[in-house]
Image: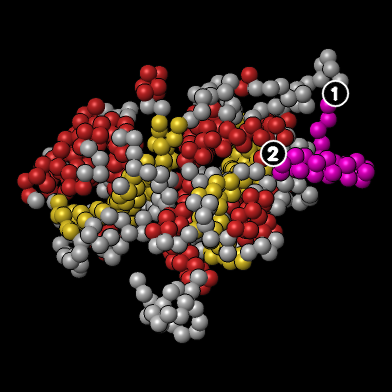
Amino acid sequence: MSETKEKKKDKKLMRGSHVLGEAAIRAGCRAYFGYPITPQNELPEYMAEQFAQMPDAVFLQAESELASINMVMGASIAGARVMTSSSSPGISLKQEGISYIAGMELPAVIVNMMRGGPGLGNIAPAQGDYFQATKGGGHGDYRLIVLAPAYGQEIADMTRQAFDLADKYRNPVMILGDGMLGQMMEPVVFPDPIDPAQLPAKPWTLTGCKGRPSRIIRSLWLDVNREEELNWRLVRKYEAITAEVVDQEMYLAEDAELIIVAYGTAARIAKGGVQRARAMGIKVGLFRPKTLWPYPSEPLARLADQVDEIIVFEMSTGQMVEDVRLAVEGRCRVSFYGRPGGVVATPEEISRVISSTHHRAHPKKVAGGRASGGSRLTVVG
Amino acid sequence: MLLKSVFSGFGGQGVLMMGYALAVAGMEEDKHVTYLPAYGAEVRGGTANCTVVVSDEEIASPIASSPEFVVAMNYPSMAKYQNMVKSGGIMFLNSDLITETLPRDDVKVVLVPANTLAHEMGNDRVLNMIMLGAMVRVTGIVSEESLSQAIETVLEGKKRSLVEINQKALAKGAEYIAAHN
């Protein structure tokens, strides 16, 4: 595309997977390692096509997921902004390497476009990997920063943020999407590209120690005291991340008596459900965590003081709902609605869930003057 | 204004391109758009469909449980979506492949013999753009100028003659509506 045309058309209609790839390249990512799996193959496809024209970039389709995550480790140790991507079963295979990367405090961006599971499951959009993403995933005491985009534009913005956060905290960052976010096209305006040479120097990388003291990056600490200190150091880092990184969207929450909590694709559907329920006169709002770890517990707790009930909607049998209950600490009732296995609910369906929850908490005014009580009479209006 | 359209047919009919072209046209009019292709372990000749939402305001859900407009390029598509179309909505049927009548009287039906019209143009493959041209003439979701312009983006890097025949097909669909409805 010519430069003038590029300027004229700064808004592009692109599928989510391609948006993520373009945003990664603009964030200075010059190394990608992966192994194919539906529904995210459009991302490696994009990286392969673009990197083929960039002499300073490396695209490699590895022989396995395990190999690809270890290539990510190596590139990160050498100082590169590096990314890998997969979908649920493939992410499971990468967990060993992710644990090592977290333990070695290496920056890396890992994309999971979730699909139906468990096992091989199917290729439809799902959210069954929340626990895996937010509670560590591999072995040992560690956390990933987990970002959950819901819009095409947010995929672009969060991908940039993911690389920045990974470098800033020397911590792997996961972008948690699903098959639908990856396939859907929306207009996107990209941030200006970063020149990787202009990024802040990383004083810890292994680049050859000629003329300087040697450095060691490792994950084996046979001295338990040093391993304990590493664990506490990670905790101190995680506390700093928790204080600085949490983010959420609140939609029609100011006067809400009822809140629905959802993330990613589920939040888009829930937002449609909120709009329908609002049209029926129900004061409902949406709380959408944009960071799943750290979880925006405090803003949610404040909302819990204001509302009668929180409904959690996930495309799973109920995983994030546990973090919601921890955040709310009994301030209000928390209920759950889920569609696991790759089923995509409709906004209409969610508005019915909202409506039934609302009516249980708020008895309708009925003919005969009894505002509440046992007998169900004809509904007025 | 928020309008949801579903395009459906069998693989090879150009169903995804119809939706993509409409979404690009909407974007070029600075509207909010989402384009959601159905994906799966699809095979040639299997079913293909996509959902396009065009709106003046931010689009919450890209999923349309009750679309205003449905374009069905074959009978299985009509059967799949005939109960989902919003009451008062419109179903566009490829009358070359669909002879069945719609069992609803609250939905308007627009019949377009897309295969025949494409064959008349000497290019059987442009049936999708004929149908899209007809659909946009009836619905006015985007302007016909934007739609024609969108073909330049959709077929960017392709031969000039290919862009032109697709643009002509859009016009032919629109003309068919002007002459028959």
Residue A276 location (% of width, % of height): 40, 59
**Residue that extends furthest to the left in the rendered view of this protein:** B179
**Residue that extends furthest to the bottom in the rendered view of this protein:** A375
Using the image, determine if residue A151 lies above or below residue A114. above
Label 1 element class: loop
Residue A32 location (% of width, % of height): 59, 34
Question: In the visual, does A335 lie left or right of A369?
Answer: right
Quadrant containing the N terminus of chain A is top left
Q: Quadrant of residue B33?
A: top left
Q: Residue at x 88, y 42 (%)?
A: A229
The residue tagged 1 is A214
Residue A338 location (% of width, % of height): 54, 64
| Amino acid type at image mark 1 | Ser
The residue tagged 2 is A244
Badge 2: how crowded within 10 Å, few (<14), some, or many (20+)? few
Question: In the visual, does B137 lie left or right of A101?
Answer: left
Distance, label 2 to label 1, CA atoms, is 33 Å
- The stretch in magenta equals A215-244
Q: Main secondary structure of the magenta part?
A: helix
Residue under mark 1: which chain is it in? A
Question: In the visual, does B164 lie left or right of A70?
Answer: left
Using the image, determine if residue A68 lies above or below residue B85. above
* Mark sitting on residue A336: none
| Amino acid type at image mark 2 | Glu
- Answer yes or no: do the residues labelled 2 and 1 have beta carbons within 8 Å? no
Q: Residue at x 70, y 61 (%)?
A: A329
User: Does the magenta segment cover residue A213?
Assistant: no
Q: Residue at x 61, y 22 (%)?
A: A196
Residue under mark 2: which chain is it in? A
